[in-house]
């Protein structure tokens, strides 16, 4: 299990390469929802998502071979790994599925990484990346199921607690579970966590119902960032040991959340980045009276025009 010491070490290790993203607070009047909120704007992170935290920590924690690194991604993780590889001066090969938006593919290619597009969904890209690593000896940087990656993502929780120590509840989005797994590893039982998932790719909900990670369909508007076929083994261990309430939201509510974040905050959030807030906006989860709620906006890699479309 990832510990607080692991996360503190990760924070020190990656500090030269990532941003400390801001927290902004809105009063109950300003939210219009009847309760105040604290938003951590992780979409302002290097490469436009939280992913560089885990990517840098994995690569700086290992001896990277001459073959470099290899990763599979719906988009954001690939951008982060490609960026980290460029900064650290190592080779990178990134495998993405056909659903990855062209804008994300272009950002990966712009780093100089080798980009391979193939397969209908993330799982096919993951299998292709693992075969390539076995062939070349490259270091695999998994999107969500490695301890070093979880520790890197856990630095989001470390910062959030330092900047908003009053929080009693925190809402995060989940795909493969790396973000939730890292943040929950930091907080443990010091606050209540809520995990929001699109109803078209509910990995954590399905795992909780089955008592183990299981395959789920992967689709909808957030599939390029939250479209893992199943929750990772490590994040699932965290779910079992720490616990969290898991809620699902529909695509139309995610779109509403994107528009709300733009209208109220002038924040551009991709569908996956707005999914946590969608749980509140839809009423899928309602905070108890007196709760101090934090919301993580975790990614911004989309065409801004799509928010208003």
Image: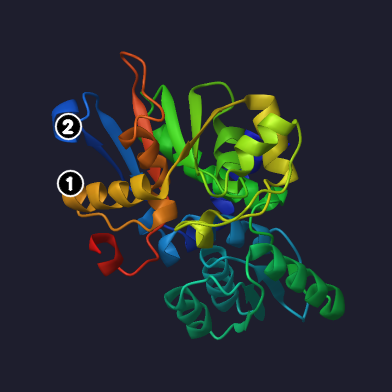
| Image x and y of residue 84, in percent | 56, 70
- Asked whether residue 41 is in view, the answer is no
Q: Quadrant of the N terminus?
A: top right
Q: In this rendering, is residue 261 above or below 135? A: above
The residue at 31%/36% (across/down) is 281
Does the residue at mark 1 contact the one at mark 2 (Cβ under 8 Å)? yes
Instruction: Residue 68 in the image: state x and y as whole percent.
Output: 72, 77
* Image side of residue 49 versus residue 241, left or right: left
Q: Within the image, what quadrant is residue 129 found in?
A: bottom right
For disc 2, the neighbor class at 10 Å (few under 14, some 14 to 19, many from 20) is few
Going by the image, does 147 lie left or right of 263? right
Residue 256 percent across, percent down from the top left: 29, 48
Residue at image point 65% right, 32% down: 239
The quadrant holding residue 43 is bottom left
What residue is at 59 percent from the left and 69 percent from the top?
Answer: 81
Mark before the other along the chain sequence, 1 or 2: 2
User: Pointer 1: residues within 10 angstroms few (<14), some, or many (20+)?
Assistant: few
Q: Tag 2's secondary structure?
A: loop
Q: Does 116 appear above or below 212?
A: below
155, 264: nearer the viewer: 264
**Residue 255 place in picture, x, y as percent:** 32, 52
Q: Residue at x 52, y 84 (%)?
A: 109
Q: CA distance from mark 1 to mark 2?
A: 10 Å
Residue 17, label in figure? none
The residue tagged 2 is 32
Q: Nearer the viewer, residue 121 or 276?
A: 121
**Tag 1 secondary structure:** helix
**200 on left or right of 35:** right
Disc 1 target residue:
264
């Amino acid at each position: 299990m990832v510990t607080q010491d692991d996360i503190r070490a990760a924070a020190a290790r990656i500090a030269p390469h990532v941003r400390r993203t801001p927290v902004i607070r809105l009063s109950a009047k300003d939210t219009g929802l009847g309760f105040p909120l604290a938003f951590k704007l992780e979409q302002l992170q290097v490469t436009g998502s939280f992913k560089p935290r885990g990517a840098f920590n994995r690569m700086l924690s290992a001896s990277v071979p001459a073959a470099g690194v290899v990763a599979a991604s719906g988009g954001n993780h690939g951008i982060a790994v490609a960026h980290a590889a460029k900064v650290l001066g190592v080779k990178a090969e990134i495998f993405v599925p056909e659903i990855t938006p062209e804008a994300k593919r272009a950002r990966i290619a712009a780093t100089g990484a080798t980009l391979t597009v193939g397969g209908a969904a993330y799982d096919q890209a993951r299998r292709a990346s693992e075969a390539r690593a076995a062939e070349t000896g490259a270091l695999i940087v998994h999107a969500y199921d490695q301890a070093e990656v979880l520790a890197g993502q856990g630095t989001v929780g470390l910062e959030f607690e330092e900047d908003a120590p009053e929080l009693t509840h925190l809402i995060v989005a989940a795909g493969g579970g790396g973000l939730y797994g890292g943040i929950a590893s930091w907080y443990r039982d010091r606050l209540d966590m809520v995990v929001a998932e699109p109803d078209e790719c509910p990995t954590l909900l399905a795992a909780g119902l089955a008592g183990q990670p299981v395959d789920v369909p992967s689709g909808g508007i957030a599939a390029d960032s939250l479209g893992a076929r199943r929750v990772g083994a490590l994040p699932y261990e965290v779910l079992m040991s720490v616990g969290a309430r898991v809620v699902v939201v529909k695509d139309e509510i995610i779109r509403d959340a994107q528009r709300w974040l733009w209208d109220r905050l002038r924040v551009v959030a991709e569908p996956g980045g707005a999914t946590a807030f969608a749980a509140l906006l839809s009423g899928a989860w309602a905070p108890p009276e007196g709760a101090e709620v934090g919301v993580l906006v975790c990614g911004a890699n989309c065409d801004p025009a799509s928010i208003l479309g």
